[in-house]
């Protein structure tokens, strides 16, 4: 029996890349919501036993798990070079959430968010193509 050379993997169809991008965007939104909900649960002065039963704590963990599943699905349907850079959207969502609750943003933070958004847009437009 001769060994067969592995066949090159065909590039992912455009629909799979779009699906992966959508999944990772929802993943980052879910992770941001999970962190916000966990922050609420952890800001309460309670012991570990009460924390484990806290609905906000449990909801935060569930959102984190669901976001992890979305990331796995995104990696399954898309190229790592597209999916992983899009995880930077989490920084954008966190800053926007901070802004929404009345925290003031410095110009450096706003510039950083603009750069992240520009990079995400470039990655999204390229779709992983060389």
Image (cartoon, rainbow, N blue to C red):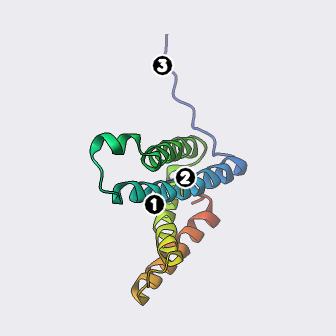
Q: Quadrant of the C terminus?
A: bottom right
Q: CA distance from mark 3 to mark 2?
A: 41 Å
On screen, residue 73 above or below 98? above
Residue 52 image-quadrant placement: top left
Q: Earlier in the sequence, mark 3 or mark 1?
A: 3
Q: Nearer the viewer, mark 1 or mark 2?
A: 1
Residues marked 3 and 2 touching at CB (< 8 Å): no
The answer to whether residue 101 is left or right of residue 126 is left
Looking at the image, which residue sits at the far top?
A: 1
Q: Nearer the viewer, mark 3 or mark 1?
A: 1
Q: Which mark is residue 27?
A: 2
Question: Dot 2, how many residues are within 10 Å of its Cα: few (below 14), some (14-19), or many (20+)?
Answer: many
The answer to whether residue 70 is left or right of residue 88 is right
Q: Nearer the viewer, residue 64 or 58?
A: 58
Question: Dot 3, how many residues are within 10 Å of its Cα: few (below 14), some (14-19), or many (20+)?
Answer: few
Question: Dot 1, how many residues are within 10 Å of its Cα: few (below 14), some (14-19), or many (20+)?
Answer: some
Q: Which residue is mark 3?
A: 3
Q: CA distance from mark 3 to mark 1?
A: 53 Å
Q: Is residue 60 visible?
A: yes
Q: Earlier in the sequence, mark 3 or mark 2?
A: 3
Residue 2: where, in percent of width, then height?
49, 15
Q: Which residue is mark 1?
A: 36
């Amino acid at each position: 029996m001769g060994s067969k050379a592995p066949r090159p993997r065909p590039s992912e169809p455009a629909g799979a890349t779009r699906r992966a991008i959508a999944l990772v965007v929802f993943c980052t939104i879910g992770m941001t919501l999970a962190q916000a909900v966990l922050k609420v649960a952890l800001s309460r002065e309670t012991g570990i036993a009460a924390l484990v039963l806290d609905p906000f704590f449990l909801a935060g963990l569930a959102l984190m798990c669901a976001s992890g599943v979305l990331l796995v699905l995104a990696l399954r349907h898309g190229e790592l070079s597209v999916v992983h850079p899009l995880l930077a959207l989490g920084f954008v969502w966190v800053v926007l959430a901070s802004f929404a609750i009345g925290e003031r943003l410095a110009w450096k933070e706003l510039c950083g968010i603009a750069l992240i958004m520009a990079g995400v847009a470039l990655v999204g437009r390229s779709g992983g193509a060389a």
